[in-house]
Every structure is written in C-alpha cells, then in structure tokens.
Image (spheres, rainbow, N blue to C red):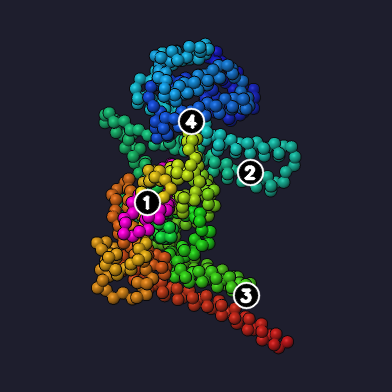
Amino acid sequence: MMNEEGDLIVKKDTDYDVFSRLLTGYLNKEFLSKLLSMSLYQSDFNSNEGNDHELIKYFKDFLISLRKDIKEAQNLNINHRVIYSLIDINVALLDLRKNITVRLAGYDTVFNHFTKLDTTARVTIQGVIDNDRIRDTVKFRERLDEIIKLIDVYYKFKKLAMPALRELGALWVESEQSAINPITYVSAVAGMFVNGYSNMSKLSDISDNDKFKNYMIFDNKSSVGPVSKELVKFLSTSFNRYRTGYPVIDKACGGGIESGSVSIISGPSNHAKSIFMINIIRNVLELNDLKENEALLMVTLEDDKFKLLSRILSIFGNFSAIDIKEGYKYTNNIINKNPDLISVTEDFWNNQINESIISITNNNGKTCKLIIMHGDENEFSMTNINKFIDQRKMEGTIIKFVAIDYIDVMCAAHSNYSSTHDDYNLHGDIVHDMKQCAKSRGIPILTISQNNRGSEDIQIEQTNSNMGGSIKKIRYADLIIMIRQDNKNDIKNNSTIGKHTNIGGLTNVTVPIRLIEDSIPFEVSITKNKSGDLAPVRYHIFSKQNLKIHSDAVTYFKEMQECDKKSSSMRTKLGAIEDSTLTIDTIAMEALDLV
C-alpha cells in the first residue's frame, strides 16, 4: 500500500516479512531524497571507503540491486512509477558526476541538465533544493558517511541474515509437510543456529560502530564529561598492549603490540618467519594476563596442524626439533609393529604436550587457551576468521589475539564498492580486511608476508620496498617487523655483531663450538610503526636445535643446557616404549618356539 506521500508501507494483513520491513527504510522519499541531495552537492565523494569513481559505482550498484529487490520481495505493494522515478534520477545524477567533461549538476543548475523530468522527479528535486540543501563540506561528509552506512547495512543483511532466514523457513516448511526424525530436526536446528549466529553476529558491527562515535565535540566544560566517559570505556574494554618478549618490538611499541592493530612479520623466503611468529605467540601467552575464558588463535595455511604442532612443542617446551620429528617417526613405527601400544604412545604425547603447551597456558596461577586452526591455501579469508571467532564466543571462549600464517596465500573478502580484483590490490584488500576485524573486535592481528629475493643480500639493509606483492600491504599495516637470517656469519663474527648489542660481548668468551654451529644470527628491525618509533637492526640468536629465537646470549646458553636435558629425557622415554615393543616381540617368538 502507498500513503498520500507516495511512500511504501507493508500490508498489515500479510505474513511478517523481515526483508520487506528492511526495504521500507530505502523505498521512501526521505532516503532517496537524501541520496539526491548528496549527489547535488559539488564535492568529490573521496573518503575512507574509496575514491570518487569507486563510490559512484557503489551507489549505482546499490540502486540497481534495489530495483531488483522490489520485484522479488514479498508483501510489497508499491507505486512503481514513483519509486522507479526517484531511483532513475539518482542513477542519472551519479552518471553525470562520473562524466568529467560535463560540469557537475548542482542545486542551482540541475534543471539545466535535466529538462525533461517527470512530475515526481521534478517535485522531489525542488523539495531537496528548498528544504535539504547541504551547506558545507562537514555536513556533506556526515551525509556521505550516513548513506554509506545505511547501504552497508543493506548489503550485510542480504549477505548474512537472509541465508539464515531462508534456512529457517525451509526447515519450518519441511517439518510441516512431513514427519521428521527428532534427532535430525534438533541437529539441523543446532547447526543452523551456530552458523546463523556466526553470520548475524557480524551485523553487530553496525551497532558496534555506534559504541564509540567517530567524532568528539569540545565547546565547554559540559562537553568534556561524555568524552571522558567514552575514553574510560574504550580503555577498559577495547585497549591493551601485548608484550612479545622481544625488547626491540616492545620498546618501539610502548610496551607491546597494541589491540586493534595489524602487525606484519616480513622477510625473505625460508628465513624462519613462521618460527619467529610461534616464538612471539609463546611469549604473548606467558607474559600477558589472559583470563581463563580467553584464547590466542593461530592459523596456519601452509603447514598442516600436526606439523605446526611439532614446531610448537619444540619452541614452547624447549625440546630438540629433531627429537620431536624422530618422536613422530618412532610413534608410527611402534604402532605399526604393535597396535596394542597405542595407549602407551598416547600417554607419551600427552605428557609432552602437557610439559610444552599446558605449562605455558597454565602458568603462575593463570589459565588461558591456545587454539590452532588450519585453513586451505587460496580459499581462506578473514570471513573464516570472523566466523570462527563468533563460534568460539558462543561456546564461551573470547579470542583476544590472532596470528595468521600468512597473507600471500589468503583470499580477500571483497568489499562491495571495490571494482579491482588483481593480485596487487587483493593483497592490500586482505590486510584491509584484517584491519577491519582488528578494529571492530579490539584485538591485535599478527601475520606474515614474504620479501623479494633482493632482500636476501645481507649487505643491503631491508626496507618496506622489499615487501613482495603489494605496497598496499604496507599502507594498511600498523607495524612492520623485518627479519632475516645471516647464514654467512656466526654469532662470534665481529662483522656480524658490529654495533648491535643484543648478542655482543661474545668475542672474549669461550663458546662451545656446538652452540656456534647450532645457531644463526637473526636480524630484527622495525620499518613501520604507527604508534611509536622505528627500530634499527638488532641481532638475535636463532637456535637450530630448539627453534627458539633469543634476544641475548645468556638466555641462549641457559636454554640450550636445559634443552639438552629435556631432549635426553624424551629420548629415554621413547626408547622405553621401543624396548617394550622388542620385549613383546621376544616373548611372542619364544612362544612360537615352544609350539
């Protein structure tokens, strides 16, 4: 039905239609007139959401989609002529803005460009000129942000809420038409609600955007109170710094990686980027006050979760990486020889995991969680991360820190207004997606990228220009940590240490040759930092034995002694399992001899 103003209303005698209700917010003169007024103001659309041409396309695509929805939506009874007229004049104005050879149509010149308008369009435009003329750039930006936000709500609802609503409707119809097994029904409902919550919780971003306003007003003493209140709320709910255990990073960042930020570890291929990330994760879990229901999520896209687990066991537990790999192999051989020893080997790995990981997540009276997740290369995006975070939230686990290995094999969750799809822009889009997730959830995201081959030359200092793929990755990142192994020198080489003090002081110290052979000088520097200072190259010690990266020589020596003891104990335990296998085999052979 239509009221006297020509606005759409939903018929009250029809079934409730959620999407039809939503459309009423767009299929009315008030909204379409606001869009007209924004287009008539002579200023570029350039904003944080995209450039002028991208946003023109964004608005046009929305209007075209709106036309299509009018035809498909249920329970709508509209005056097509009125609504289509207002949509068409909006599209025409947007086309005019895109044509740089034509002077923009403003409030005072619009009728010069459109001499043959129908009555609806002419009356509506005149109403905008008389009653809704935008007077300055500030008001224009506010109107632009308002329209973008409203359209974003439309797209999010269609993408996230509609599938869940359709699934619920289909399940309801199925249950009415035929008998359905209660277990199947409950299982379907449970799965639907988990997925539905995950998708629809992303709509909470809309209300989250209102949690902290995007502006502050200072005019008198009374205006300070609301700002102070909002500041305290932000600091208590959405702000934190996470210590990494590496002074070169923590000092530059004012105490640690900041919540709401994206940090990128970048370096040449096969220079221990993933290993450095695991070292940071261990330290974040150990050094920061994470609560029982809070977790750190690590995502691997290249390695399977069990290969990643082997590295974590070595780094977290200070075990020899070679011995962990041998443990994998021994377990396979032992089970193949005697399947009855499955429980024994399970006990062995249970002890190893407790000693390595649980000793970190349950430390000094605190309890938190480490979650390891595997995703498929070139198919995984931040959409998967957001969904996973929401699913864990339903179970009572709050993810406070995310680490992803790595950008270059991810996909972008494309924004509606972007028309670019090449790899160069996609890498930037991926980091932008990370930034949106980090900001909306108040969590830090740590990830990895790869530098070009030129960065392998140890004589040439690494810069952000070495980062491969896209300069847009640099643009959206808050912190860039450049790393590199120096495979041509050792930790006692003066030319390597130079002025870098992290591993200095070794030249006059007797260092066991094995510790030199098992270590590699490891460069760390900060080449971009939005919240602090840059940091020149500082050398660390990478241990090939336990895969740990140490900030100083004293810690390295101490941990290697401990590693030797723990790895020896691990080998003894594995040998005991293997000996038990040999004993069983011997008893079996003797029994056969008796027969």
- Tag in front: 2 or 4: 4
Marks 2 and 4 sit apart, C-alpha to C-alpha, by 36 Å
Please tell me whether residue 459 is drawn above or below residue 464 in the rendered image.
below
* Whether residue 346 is situated above or below residue 6 in the rendered picture: below
Dots 2 and 4: beta carbons under 8 Å? Answer: no
Residue annotated with mark 1: 466
Q: Is residue 201 left or right of residue 269?
A: right
Locate the N terminus by quadrant.
top right
**Residue 585, quarter of picture:** bottom right
Kindly report the distance in space between the C-alpha atoms of the residues bearing marks 2 and 3.
45 Å
Looking at the rendered structure, the kind of residue marked 4 is: Tyr
Query: How far apart, in angstroms, are the residues tagged by discs 4 and 3?
Result: 64 Å
Chain-order first, disc 4 or disc 3: 4
The residue singled out by tag 2 in the image is 189
Q: Which residues are magenta?
A: 436-464
Compared to residue 556, the image places residue 284 above or below, namely: above
Residue on which disc 3 sits: 337
- How crowded is the residue under tag 2: few (<14 C-alpha within 10 Å), some, or many (20+)? some
Nearest the eye: 20 or 484: 484
Q: Residue 237's spot in the image, x, y percent?
A: 39, 44
Dot 2 or dot 3: first in sequence order is 2
Of the image marks 3 and 1, the number of the one nearer the N terminus: 3
Residue at horizontal 51 percent and vertical 76 percent from the top: 573
Q: Are marks 1 and 4 in contact (CB under 8 Å)?
A: no
Q: Answer whether residue 441 is magenta in the image.
A: yes
Q: On the image, numbered disc 4 is attached to which residue?
A: 58
371 falls in the magenta region: no
Q: CA distance from mark 1 to mark 4?
A: 33 Å
Q: Disc 1 marks which amino acid?
A: Asn
